[in-house]
Image (spheres, grey):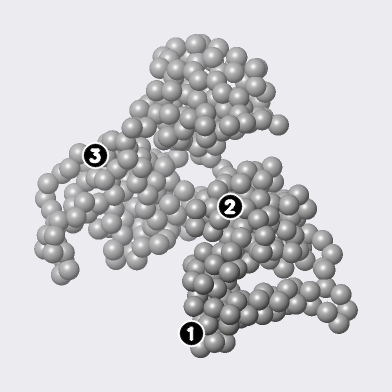
Amino acid sequence: MKNKVVLITGAKGGLGNPVTRRFLDAGAYVAGVSLNISQADFPDANFMAIPANFSKAETVNSVVDSVVKRFGKLDVLVHVLGGFAGGKSVAVSAAAIPSTLLESEMFGHERGAFTDAKDRRLGKFELAHGGTLYLDEIGDMPLDLQAKVLRALQERTIERLGGQESIRVDVRVLAATNRDLEVAMRDGKFREDLYYRLNVVTLNLPPLRERRRDIPLLVDHFLAKHAPELGERGVAPEALDRLVGYEWPGNVRELENAIERAIVLGSGDVIETDDLPERILESTGASTKTPGENFYEGVRQAKREIILKALERAQGNYTEAAKALGMHPNNLHRLMRSLELKAAMGK
């Protein structure tokens, strides 16, 4: 089934725009806010572009109802091209940066603001001015910094660390978290006022196991993503069935890891069932192990022997060995680490 894609052009306010909100009310699936999207990004999709500069509620309702009627409630994928679409897209993760450095990362600092502040540095809010600031894992943000983010959102001004000047910023903010913020508020770990300031439109993304029809699309995306470095690959139908049937406790990150691993360890142009991690095979079907034989360990050992023989013929020259094996030298090194050959060879 084709994706039904609706492009809402000129939707200043993004997901808070009345047209977008009406789509949500009508049961449409809003995948997110896209800054740069064209029909080439969805070659198998039906497209309908509508303007979003409506002011009368009845006009908004009429347009949305006609689109939903044409495409069907459950298969409308809405992308919003907002007034910030021409600006930068800047991301920061509250979980990936130590709390002592996060404030400087968000708001910037002046020279001499602290010991190692040798130069002025712009923060993420300033860098995203006129565009979109993506606050990832906002549930991990310290309470004192939450107050400063709230002020920046309300006043649309910031101050760099060590500075006294109020700097005007105009950004569209998207925030994401894997935590239950309502529970965090009750526990005193997330500010209630910031929650309601951010919670204009909420998109609850179900776990991957609850949206299995997305898995083939994600597999294609990850294959294309890693193709420049690891080479182009396809996926055998049986292998794809196993991927779709797996529960994915690690969600999309686990899926990407499985695809990358299958590309590196696989020996052909098509990812086969045997190239998938064993946990997926054990979870989605009968194990291929037979009494007295470990199939996967046998395959692993065979790969080790092939690589060692290629290196022996190439007299230890990794580039020549990789050429003989039909792979890039970087892929050979990565495969050797995965097979624990590097450690065995003391290199």
Report x, y in % for residue 53.
40, 17
Above or below, comparing residue 75 to residue 104 in the picture: above
Residue 139 falls in image quadrant:
bottom left
Question: Of the residues tagged 2 and 3, which is closer to the observer?
Answer: 2
**Number of the label disc, if any, that sits on residue 129:** none
Q: Residue at x 54, y 87 (%)?
A: 345
* Amino acid type of the residue that numbered disc 3 sits on in the rendered structure: Val
For the residues labelled 3 and 1, say whether their Cβ atoms are less than 8 Å apart.
no
Q: Residue at x 68, y 55 (%)?
A: 270
* Residue ID for mark 2: 232
103 with respect to 64 (left or right): left
Q: Find the distance from the CA under tag 1 to the CA under tag 2.
A: 29 Å
Dot 2: element: loop
State the quadrant of the N terminus: top right
Question: Of the residues tagged 3 and 1, which is closer to the observer?
Answer: 1
Residue 127 falls in image quadrant:
top left
Report x, y in % for residue 313.
58, 80
Residue 3 falls in image quadrant:
top right
Dot 1: element: loop
Kindly tell me whether residue 46 is visible in this rendering.
yes
For the residues labelled 1 and 2, say whether their Cβ atoms are less than 8 Å apart.
no
* Residue ID for mark 1: 347
For the residues labelled 2 and 3, say whether their Cβ atoms are less than 8 Å apart.
no
Above or below, comparing residue 59 to residue 131 in the picture: above
Report x, y in % for residue 184.
48, 55
**Number of the label disc, if any, that sits on residue 169:** 3
* Amino acid type of the residue that numbered disc 1 sits on in the rendered structure: Lys
